[in-house]
Structure formats: structure tokens, C-alpha cells
Image (spheres, rainbow, N blue to C red):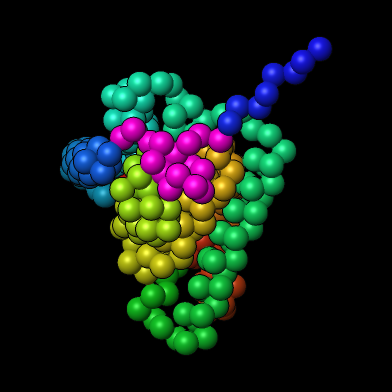
Amino acid sequence: MAFPAEPPTPPSLTPDTGGSGADWTGRDVLTGVVWFIALFVVGQILVAIAAVATSSATSKGTYATAFVVGAAVEVGIAVVAMRLSFGRHGGGIGRLGLRPPSGSTLGWALAAFAAALIVSTVYGEVITRLDIKQLQSSCAQQIPAGVRHTRWLLALASLVVIAFAPVCEELFFRGFVFPGLARVWGIVAAIAVSGLLFSSAHLDYKSFIPIAGVGMIFAFTYWRSGNIVSTMLAHGAFNSTSIALIAGGACEKSTSTAGAVALAHLLAALPVGHWL
């Protein structure tokens, strides 16, 4: 009895084609980035309206609105990625690299997760030892005390961070942006630029470097694994670690140690801070 062959690695991700298999163009990618910005701006307006309505930017109602809007924007960028890729050029969700995971997929996910943690920790150690105060951040800058100390708000934030962000952001930045750029500029440039775009979207100059590094790691992982599930799992594990540390009270400790600064930069990769 013959067993069916494993589906081939998507042409857009094989090393010898440099991304030429992606039908969408640089113009499609630019259109997607414009849509991303538009969705983000609309989201910020809605959060501002909620803040005015509750007469406070730090009310529970404003925080809840921010997380709901954040989840909606995450879904929105995934829809944009789908519409501008296989929705416009044919095929299905597999065009964005979504395939059943294999053992190697899980191995790549674990490697990417470990590399992301190393990048965050090393960056935190470096800016602490060099005493670069302009780049040092705290948990409170990403997750305000009003959220950390309110169980249902922290649960809502966790839902956005763990369930929505890893899937939607990976579909957009790695599944759509990266192959589109690779088709135009080649793999190396696409890894670098997609990582920079990923970091820019987080709007945190203090953590721009480590987030860009994580984005590049995920792009490389997707390229080599040929399965976006690998980066979704790594992204989810990365965010879950951050949330677990927050729930465990790590943000209540002093940020004077290198480890705590590294933690702060790990938290800075979360999408929560965008909406507060």
C-alpha cells in the first residue's frame, strides 16, 4: 500500500527560489502595510473615544475596550493578509504557509522560542551593564498596574496575547509580508526588513532592537521550516511566558537587576501596550 507523499515545501520558501513562488508583489505588501496602519489608527481612535466616555484613560472600561479593539485589529490584519495573497492570486490558506505540523515543525518552533528568549535576555543584560537608561523599560510601561491587579482584565489581555497575536501576526508578517518581500529583494533582505516592520508595528523604541531580532528569527524559522505553524507556536510560547511571569508577580519586583530588565524587554514584545 502506497502512502501519500508529504506536501512539498511552499515554493515561496525554498532556498533556491528566493521567494519567487509568491504571486503577490511588493505593491501588495505595501498595500497590506497601509491597511495595517489604517486599522491601527482606527483602533486608537476607538480607544480614545472609550477613554473620553469613561472620563479616564486608566479606567477598567477603557482597558477592556483597548483589548477588544486590539483583538479586532489582529483579526483585521490576518484578513488583509488573506485577501491580498491567495484571495487575490488564487489558492487557499496554505499559500500563507499553514500546513499540518510535523516533528520538524515542533523542533523549529522550540528552537525559535529559545532563540527569542536569548535575544531578549542578552539585550537586557547589555543595556543594564552599559547603564543605557534611555533604553531601559519596566513592566508597568507595557502592562499597567490596573490591568495586572484585575484578574478579568489580565485574563482578557492574555486572550489577546496568546490566542490572537501569534496566529494573526504570523499570518501577516511571516506568511504574507516576508514572502512578498523575498520575491522582490531575496531571502536575506526580506528577513531583515520584515523583522524591522514587525518591530516598528510595536511602537516601542526602547525595545525596537530585541523585537526586530525576534521578528528576524521567526522569519528565518518560517523560511527553513516551510510551515508557519512553527512560528505561531514559538510566538505563542514567547507571549505565554511573558503573561505567566506577569501573573506570577514579576512586575512587582525591582527593575534594578539585569534579569528584571530582560524581563521588561520580553514583555515589550507583547501587543498589549499598543492599546493603553
Q: Is residue 246 above or below residue 236?
A: below
Q: Name the spot of residue 130 as percent of width and height, x first.
A: 47, 87
**Quarter occupied by the N terminus:** top right
Q: Name the spot of residue 226 as percent of width and height, x first.
A: 55, 40
Can residue 164 be seen by looking at this rendering?
no
Which residue occupies the extreme right position in the image?
Answer: 1
Q: Is residue 168 above or below residue 241?
A: above
Q: How many labels does the image show?
A: 0
At x 75%, y 18%, the residue is: 3
Residue 195 on the magenta span: no
At x 33%, y 53%, the residue is: 185
Q: Residue 29 occupies which quadrant of the picture?
A: top left
At x 31%, y 25%, the residue is: 89
Q: Nearer the viewer, residue 144 or 205?
A: 205
Q: Which of 116 and 273 is in front in this view?
A: 116
Q: Name the spot of residue 176 as percent of width and height, x first.
A: 37, 38
Which residue occupies the extreme top position in the image?
Answer: 1
At x 38%, y 41%, the residue is: 20
Q: What kind of secondary structure does the magenta stretch mostly adopt?
A: loop
Q: Residue 171 occupies which quadrant of the picture?
A: top left
In the shown orientation, is residue 117 left or right of residue 41? right
Q: Is residue 143 above or below residue 74?
A: below
Q: What stretch is highlighted in magenta?
A: 9-24
Which residue occupies the extreme bottom position in the image?
Answer: 130
Can residue 121 be seen by looking at this rendering?
yes
In the shown orientation, is residue 51 left or right of residue 72? left
Q: Name the spot of residue 83 as percent of width and height, x first.
A: 30, 26
